[in-house]
Image (tube, grey):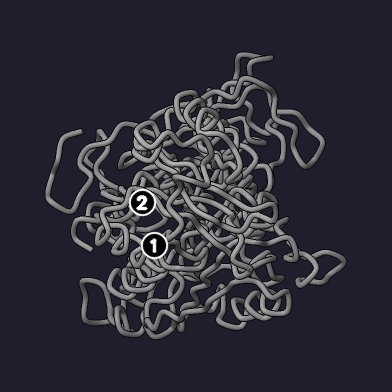
Amino acid sequence: MKQVDENNVGFVEKKFYTIKEDLNLESNAILKNPTIAYETYGTLNTQKNNAILICHPLTADSHVAGYNKKKEKGWWDIIIGPEKAIDTNKYYVICSNVLGGCKGTTGPKSINPETNEEYGLNFPIVTILDMIKAQKKLITHLDIQQLFAVIGGSMGGMQVLQWCVSYPSMVKNAIAIATSAYSTAQQIAFNEVGRRSIIDDPKWNHGQYYKNLKTPDKGLALARMIAHITYLSKESMLKKFSRNLQDKEEYSFNFETEFQVESYLKHQGNTFTKRFDANSYLYLTKAFDYFDLRENKSLEDGLKSIKTRLLLVGISSDWLFSIKDMKKILMALNKNNADVKYAELNSEYGHDAFLIESGQLTYMISNFLSKATVKDVMNTQFKYLHKDSSIKKASKMMLDHNITHILILSENNHLEGIVTSWDLLESITKDKILLKNVMTKKVITCQDDDQINKVARIMNKHNLSSLPVLNKDKKVIGIISTDHISNLYNTSKC
């Protein structure tokens, strides 16, 4: 990977993973062996507990940071990279193109294995749930059992919430930005007008336009123009365009493009047709419309399975996903006694502010991630013995599992001591048989809700490689080692 500058991940290559089995969709349709396009940044640590999944918004893709082969910068490069909010020196960052997309993941533009032609409208309807089912297959393929965090905005935020609901034990932390737990009538209305613009373009041809290369560009451009208006705020449009004319000082008194705002929207629409597939736009906006996490119209019930530590970020000038929408999620999670925080991004840029306001986002995201606790990264699978166990048994356990420390617990899992390989060597000279005669009784411990940076400082100060983790009842529930936190925090600097 070639480095471009100090705070950029450099040039990256898109990767592909084809799911070995068919994917059962929410509609009961079956998608045969779909392929997922994805990119990764940073290094997965030995404990595989530093992975962050980025979920992209409606028309973005897996290229979230760095530069691709076309030398295009990733769509969220402002916050992903070395020493940025999502620091690739600490985290292993993954971003995949959603199911139904057109940037490498199987979608309507892909070849149907049964016909050897593009799917077109034979591609099944997909939902946000289907998207994260495919993402979960990718995460499993990467041999990651639990994600340190899932982060996304807009439709990416919908995916974040779906992850938290559907796979609560797989997600330690989550950040949902400018999103909703269900699509509103207004959002569905804008999406339908966009879809109708495409469908009513004669070149759409019922979705079968791939062979004749006459793509429904006019319809797709119009759909993008409509959508783009919803991404901007009244204030930002006034400041950027006001009523200024484009390259003229007087009205032409005709229907040509005259105002700067008209020219801008036209440019956005035309540019979009060069990078996006019209059928994918239909499918993804439909998935957006179907999204609803409520159970029996109750958001509280729909979010009750969430166990994840969660940060919700609203945008002050966003009217597509309003502050009110975000606070509905907050209220429901608070009623469920979830571990949730809320922050507000003050910006005049509207919905798109989460792609622009790097300063505020950096503060919010890095602050939230840095306050991760021991329970986010600790190992709950640890070896222990009772004090009346023999030294021979402890020696065999160390050799069999290649470990140097064994916790000594009481019958009710309270910590009584610790025995090290050095203790076992010393027992030979002292002719001891039982662990209680050689174990160290004064043991430095940490709590499951301690912040990782605090624990890193303790371990560095006392030159320790691991610490037992206790819960509020003083019972041992895990162990944290320098391997667990080596990527997240440099203990030599703590």
Q: Residues within 10 Å of mark 1 (few under 14, many from 20)?
A: many
Residue ID at (39%, 85%): 235
Disc 1 and disc 2 in contact, CB within 8 angstroms: yes
Q: Quadrant of residue 78?
A: bottom left
The reply, left or right, for residue 175 in relation to residue 369 is right
Q: How many marks?
A: 2
The reply, left or right, for residue 276 in relation to residue 389 is left
Q: Amino acid at mark 1?
A: Ile
Q: CA distance from mark 1 to mark 2?
A: 8 Å
Q: Nearer the viewer, residue 6 or 467?
A: 467
At which x and y percent is residue 85? 31, 62
Relative vertical location of residue 19 with respect to residue 48 in this rendering, above or below: above
- Which quadrant does the C terminus fall into? bottom left
Q: Nearer the viewer, residue 289 or 432?
A: 432
* Residue receiving disc 2: 485
At which x and y percent is residue 31? 69, 28
Q: Residues within 10 Å of mark 2 (few under 14, many from 20)?
A: many
The reply, left or right, for residue 241 in relation to residue 406 is left
Relative vertical location of residue 13 with respect to residue 189 in this rendering, above or below: above
* Residue receiving disc 1: 452
Residue ID at (77%, 42%): 26
The reply, left or right, for residue 491 in relation to residue 203 is left
Q: Amino acid at mark 2?
A: Ile
At which x and y percent is residue 421? 38, 36
Relative vertical location of residue 243 with respect to residue 46 in this rendering, above or below: below
Q: Which residue is the extreme one toward the right?
A: 296
Q: Nearer the N terminus, badge 1 or badge 2?
A: 1
Relative vertical location of residue 261 with respect to residue 407 in this rendering, above or below: below
Residue ID at (59%, 24%): 19
The secondary element bearing badge 1 is classed as helix
